[in-house]
Amino acid sequence: MPYIPHTEEEVGQMLDTIGVDSIEDLFDEIPASLRHKSLDGVPTQATEMEVTRLMHERAALDGQPLCFMGAGAYDHHIPAAVWQITTRGEFYTAYTPYQAEASQGTLQLLYEYQTMMANLNALDVSNASLYDGASAMAEAILMAVRANRKSKSKRILMPANVHPAYRKTAEAIVTNQGITFELIDYDHTSGCIDPASLPTEPGDFAALIIPQPNFFGTLEDVNVLTDWAHKHKALVVGVVNPIALAVLVPPGEWGESGADIACGEGQPLGIPMSSGGPFYGFMCCKQAYVRQMPGRIIGRTVDLDGKPGYTLTLQAREQHIRRSKATSNICTNQGLMITASTIHMALLGAEGLERVALSCHDNTRKLIEKLTSIDGVEVVFSGAYFHEVLIRLSAPVPEVMRALYAQNILPGYAIQDDYPELENCLLVCATEMRTDSDIETYASHLQRVMGK
Amino acid sequence: MPYIPHTEEEVGQMLDTIGVDSIEDLFDEIPASLRHKSLDGVPTQATEMEVTRLMHERAALDGQPLCFMGAGAYDHHIPAAVWQITTRGEFYTAYTPYQAEASQGTLQLLYEYQTMMANLNALDVSNASLYDGASAMAEAILMAVRANRKSKSKRILMPANVHPAYRKTAEAIVTNQGITFELIDYDHTSGCIDPASLPTEPGDFAALIIPQPNFFGTLEDVNVLTDWAHKHKALVVGVVNPIALAVLVPPGEWGESGADIACGEGQPLGIPMSSGGPFYGFMCCKQAYVRQMPGRIIGRTVDLDGKPGYTLTLQAREQHIRRSKATSNICTNQGLMITASTIHMALLGAEGLERVALSCHDNTRKLIEKLTSIDGVEVVFSGAYFHEVLIRLSAPVPEVMRALYAQNILPGYAIQDDYPELENCLLVCATEMRTDSDIETYASHLQRVMGK
Amino acid sequence: MSSGINMLIFEQSRKGRTNPSQAPFERPELTGIPESLQRKKRVVMAETSEMQTVRHYTRLSKKNFSIDTHFYPLGSCTMKYNPRACNSLSMLPGFLSRHPYAPDSMSQGYLSCMYELQEMLKDVTGMKEVSLTPAAGAQGEFAGMAMIRAYHDSRNDDQRTEVLVPDAAHGTNPATAVMCGYKVREIPTNDQGDVDLEALKQVVGPQTAGLMLTNPSTLGVFERQIEAIAGVVHEAGGLLYYDGANLNAILGKVRPGDMGFDVIHMNLHKTFSTPHGGGGPGAGPVGVNERLKPFLPVPMVAYDGDHYSWVTEKENPQTIGRLSGFMGNAGVLLRAYIYARLLGREGMVRVSEYSTLNANYMLALSKQKGFDLAFPDRRATHEFIITLKRQAKDLGVNTMDFAKRLLDYGFHAPTTYFPLLIPECLLVEPTETEDKETLDAFMDVMAKIEQEARDDPEYVKGAPYTQPVRRLDDVRAARELDLVWKSE
Amino acid sequence: MSSGINMLIFEQSRKGRTNPSQAPFERPELTGIPESLQRKKRVVMAETSEMQTVRHYTRLSKKNFSIDTHFYPLGSCTMKYNPRACNSLSMLPGFLSRHPYAPDSMSQGYLSCMYELQEMLKDVTGMKEVSLTPAAGAQGEFAGMAMIRAYHDSRNDDQRTEVLVPDAAHGTNPATAVMCGYKVREIPTNDQGDVDLEALKQVVGPQTAGLMLTNPSTLGVFERQIEAIAGVVHEAGGLLYYDGANLNAILGKVRPGDMGFDVIHMNLHKTFSTPHGGGGPGAGPVGVNERLKPFLPVPMVAYDGDHYSWVTEKENPQTIGRLSGFMGNAGVLLRAYIYARLLGREGMVRVSEYSTLNANYMLALSKQKGFDLAFPDRRATHEFIITLKRQAKDLGVNTMDFAKRLLDYGFHAPTTYFPLLIPECLLVEPTETEDKETLDAFMDVMAKIEQEARDDPEYVKGAPYTQPVRRLDDVRAARELDLVWKSE
Ligand SMILES: Cc1ncc(COP(=O)(O)O)c(C=O)c1O
Ligand SMILES: Cc1ncc(COP(=O)(O)O)c(C=O)c1O
């Protein structure tokens, strides 16, 4: 039987040992009235050969377009070594490291990950992953409300230029606990929050969210914003792009005393775009808040012989110990993605990460230069950018996009549904993967389409 | 530096330890007149990202046609597990197991391979691989000449329906040692060697080669041929398809006393077609000839504590011990392919191998039925077949092929260059991978093309 | 051992060492970004060569137990064989390179798989609609409880502030209820492992939003009074939530929908055998009955007979919303889809049959070998519980000691100390993919350890001896927090 | 240890156990094949489940040392990092599924890689033309010597029956010469590791077909008299064959073509870092100068500036012919091509520079630690030789003992007892991809073992102690042949 090793003879011996006549007898505690007969809605079994062919066909259907789309998922180079090691059975088919002594591989790797991630964010500690960037922001909000001892408020200040899907996710997850969001509008010239527009008397609020870069790709004045929030006894939650952190001031160094919590989407660090998942959410914070942090945390300790080793720690925060009083309900997290990301970061090193970041920035600059040289294409916002820029077309975006799809180009993300005020705007991105000739291809097709 | 871990500081320390000023100094024993300046014919270095893109483009260029071609390389299903395990670093990046104690993984696997291969061929022993099927036949010929104590002859009887590339390879390899081939013509009706046509007084010859199936796909009367050769004190070398052996009488059971040596191409057992290599040659023989066998052989033995273990054995046959008196010059063989093949055979089991073989046979039968129902298409030979059949078209084969290539179909192998007497003939094959609808696709396109 | 084997990657790092092939060779300028927003100090990462990195992580991997290398009978976790085809086929370039916001026209391959998976899961669970988006079991629970809340809210039934949870429940259940703004009320279990029906009746009422139930329960038995329980809760206006961690035990035998559940989550990383990856990712799709359909989390996939498309907030305005930036763990869902196609309807029934056979066989062996069972008179489902209370008391060797000693014999330990209400418990789940010889060997070793515990308890308490480290000091780990490596 | 860890796959096999997913479910009839040609008894294979198989071979793999896990300084073998990109890119579906007889029109991607590889190898070796087809070094040697023979034959120069081979040569050299129908004559080496030029002059003559030379030689030194040697052999009408096993040492520094060689083979699985796979596959392309071009083995790849095509017997009627059914180890060649593109001309020079630096550094450390060197006054090339003759004599602990003890410390042993003319030798080749810390650690361990040998020689002679088996009985293996498992 597929994947089942039992021979008929063995089944007989096993039933004898149990003392029943048939496997069916083992289900005799299920009320007969409830027993189900067949699974007609499930196709009949297929051989691996058949399924292989099917999946090759399905995968081929979706093309592999030239990607100028970002908006939360980025087309970066991933060294071949990353997934070849990550999919080794010992990493790929292990469980959560409950038996630490038999899981030192995963545990040491996670400790290394925590170190890399904390360093990248310039914060004291990191957890070992949350589901994705959006849900990590939701968890960061819950955490900030718990952690902010100076505020009784459940009010969160949320810039309107935070990724719309992140805001929706946060809403779905945190509002059941009475937490409310107050939107801060962005400055319609720069695309950023204008610090000058912030109220001098904002009232009690638990936390300010600061996206860096924001959804429009432009860079917030994180230092001023952080200091403002701290002045008002709120915590600061940075939502950051980890590649950008190689060249941008890290959350732990924002303003006078740094952001309190940083979170974001780990995908750019070695995870393929793969339809949006599995990705992973990262979260770092100051030491003072570590006991409020959700998710697994690995600590270094010693064994009976005094030899260093690694183990799950601070489990008293977690649902399997604290149950209804846990910091979060998260259990299974995104371990394997962390495996990949850790190997990815180790392979790139600081220098590599910087070169990737610089190249993304530079390619986007080149892209924008090319595109805006086309009649009817202009940059929307004046703010500095990292690797995404919002452009406005003089032609209807949906039609332009269709024409470019036909050329196997993903021209960017149409932002109109999320921001009705930004009609015919397209959020474009060029990572280190885009060559000059890719950019030329995009520009020339766009020119042709716009010229019609 | 790519792949080189040295820091500048370390290089300095190392040069100090050596006592030279520069790396350049280390090359001072090379006569200055010979020193080379630059490698202009080699492109400049590229990042993995660039090379990844290049190779994706190159791979995409070659299409993935619907394959009805065999002729020595076959499109079989390979379980996903095979190569995922085979490419684990411990198998993939180990050397030949010279230090047995640190290579028990590879060694035990090879011992298991030898067992499977000997069983498949119903012969006593197997080596641990040769380069490929063609060179294995060449080695088998050299071995037969050495092993046949009853014959002083270096004459080999070689059927004309042995794979032409195999014959060419054997010629290139063995004729330097004075070995000669005498071609045996095939029967032009059956496509097989007609036992009745064999001389009653063939004279002294060292060995008879028997292909099963032969290059035309038809089945030789191996029992009669074997007995005939043995009667004349020649050895019998079977050149066999290992998938076919699941259902065909194995070389060890041919005739009264079985073939003496069996060899062939291992590719059908878990190796992708991959432009023809790396494949591997297998070789099995009777116990009596084991010391004449070329290639590595693994033996089971015990360690100091009496525990079983595996090691290279009978090394006195090999070049690194015996040098000019070795049974062959082979050193590096096709180890990794054996790793894949062994896992492949273990995953399929006897039942799986049989079902693959039966399905190949059945699909080929269906294919032939379909194709010969087209006007102007007929089967050339009357012999029984396994999974390849020679058909003759009433239209010029090169043109037909071009038309089918345009439909992304590989219609088969045109045999004309090798056998001028078989004009407009095409050797076709349908493995277990071909569905009824694939066959239909081929037939309908062929019909259209032939109808023109 | 060889140099570096226990070193951290950072300890192998050297200033000036680089691996330039993995990033563009050039270092363009950073233009147009204000100084104040630029990073000043370079990140401390590992500066290692590619080979050092590959060797380091390859070696680290060898310090793990895993399904591919060891029997791993971790109860409630369903550690069964993860077909290798699911890995390679879900990672085909076409799937890996698909941007989540690619247009439908460039997504029909992926969307068709997701749609078919939704349909299969509906049939398997007996529910009316499925959303695949939750990223793991706990997020599925969240989605389920949030839908229950949305349902009551939509009826302006705002007195329902309590969620009932049996004391044997997994920790995620109460934690989830709280995340959804509910108070948790524990329901006791009777000595047969069933819910204490009388106790349930006493606490159920107009304040009851719902009951979260695992069936088969985490005690390794099937809740026989399920129809009565459903009746009691429904009568009070509460809804029934099904925790699908143990769906493996009943695939094709009985369906949560038929048992009266209103909403369920599935752990595809258990029942549908997607790999656990050392802690995830998982996938926790939710299925609902008719009345909860409007509240399902988005996105989902629709099919009009010709074209697959997304279902979003637009089509489902009452949705509880989104739970992740895109569509949860798409690649895990693909693996589950492939697994489901490989098994087909024939294979799915075998899953529950042989996992149940294996568990009951081990239960029978346990009895033969004199181990105490939590519920000796019950059938095992796909798992069962041994309690080592007697051994802990008589020999001073507890469940943790047995667990660690098992590692020395090359077996991963079963789940220990869960569920909390069985003292010194071992929750054993062999799964259907293990062979009889392995089960026999495991039980032989259990008996052997018991003998060791009798002969030399201190030795057993000192286990493990053969792992990369001996028993670790967890107390110190939590007290002297060392979570991030720092160079001296 | 856990059940099965040392078992053979056959011992885990059970009658009736199957893994049906890996073959078609149907069992069609075998029609039209005479009974007498049909197999009667089912093959004895392993009947195991997919998980058993995966677990068995995964566990087996863990019993290997490899580059990805261990320092592996096997002299003459060039065990350096095999970039993982070469693996994944050479295994793209388009490459794997290409039938070797696919038409040129469906092969331009593959053929262009092969053509460019030919061109690069020409430049690297300084030869005029390259054929990629030999499947490994030894087959490259065969091709080379067969071409030398074909050349002499083409000139009707049939008195040339001897091939000269230095005594330090690899065993494949004399074995190859014999396969080409030649007699072998050994040339002695002088005490500086160079060929004994006088001895060479004495045996060279009209019967000399050629000389097979490795340079740098297998002794880890560069043959300084190479120009004189070439002169002597050429003057006598013989040709010069270059064994390219040590090309790693001179990449971009000096070219065999410029040294006067007429034909060379390269071991791409050494210099171009294709993985060794536990014993292959390799690739042994041959390069030739102008006069041997007509004899190159086919197929090769040609390019007319627009289209890539095959060169076969048709275009090259004087070819020595074919050496394999198709084109040798195509996938290995692809890996080498990818490696060459990654390194580029800049990286290739670094290969020789840093491999030479590493070897000379270890040589210097060896001196410091008091080990005897085979050639203490010479530069090391990319490898060098320690001789343990003194330790064998004084302490009774020989090279094999050192080698086995090294395994206990997590280092693969260097090549032992080769070349044969250095007693108790260790041929050490660190390669350019190892870091200084590892080289230091290795030499520390060497010194430590020497100390152990002094303190407790029996202990060292009993090594290894930490491997899956202790020292194996090779004599018994050869005497009581057990090559195939048989069920009782
Ligand atoms: C009974 C039960 N419920 C819920 C969960 C939570 O699932 P997940 O870990 O996928 O979040 C688990 C898994 O650990 C479980 O065993
Ligand atoms: C010096 C030398 N020549 C020739 C060979 C033979 O090469 P291969 O093993 O690829 O046949 C080797 C490799 O072992 C070698 O070291």
Image (cartoon, coloured by chain):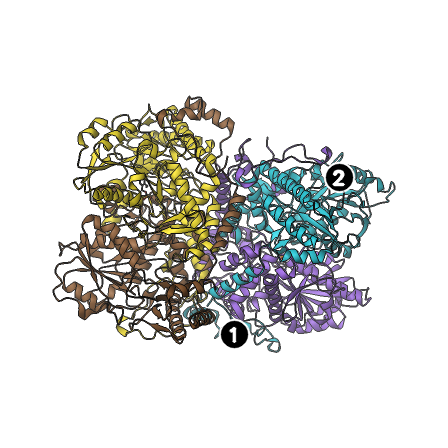
Chain colours: A cyan, B brown, C purple, D yellow
> Quadrant location of residue D53?
bottom left
Q: Residue B225, relative to residue D357: is it above or below?
A: below
Query: For mark 1, what is the residue?
Result: A24
Q: Earlier in the sequence, mark 1 or mark 2?
A: 1
Q: Is residue D417 left or right of residue D113?
A: left
Residue B263 in view (yes/no): yes
| Element carrying mark 2 | helix
Residue in the picture at 36% in, 56% down: D8
Q: Residue B338, relative to residue D358: is it above or below?
A: below
Q: Position of residue C222 (x, y in %)?
A: 60, 69
Q: Residue furthest front?
A: B452
Q: Residue C261, relative to residue B105: is it above or below?
A: below
Residue in the picture at 17% in, 63% down: B229
| Element carrying mark 1 | helix
Viewer-side residue, D41 vs C310: C310
Q: Is residue D43 left or right of residue B7?
A: left
Q: Is residue A123 left or right of residue C56?
A: right
Q: Residue furthest right?
A: A201
User: Which quadrant is the N terminus of chain C positioned in?
Assistant: top left
State yes or no: discs 1 and 2 in contact (Cβ < 8 Å): no
Amino acid tagged 2: Val
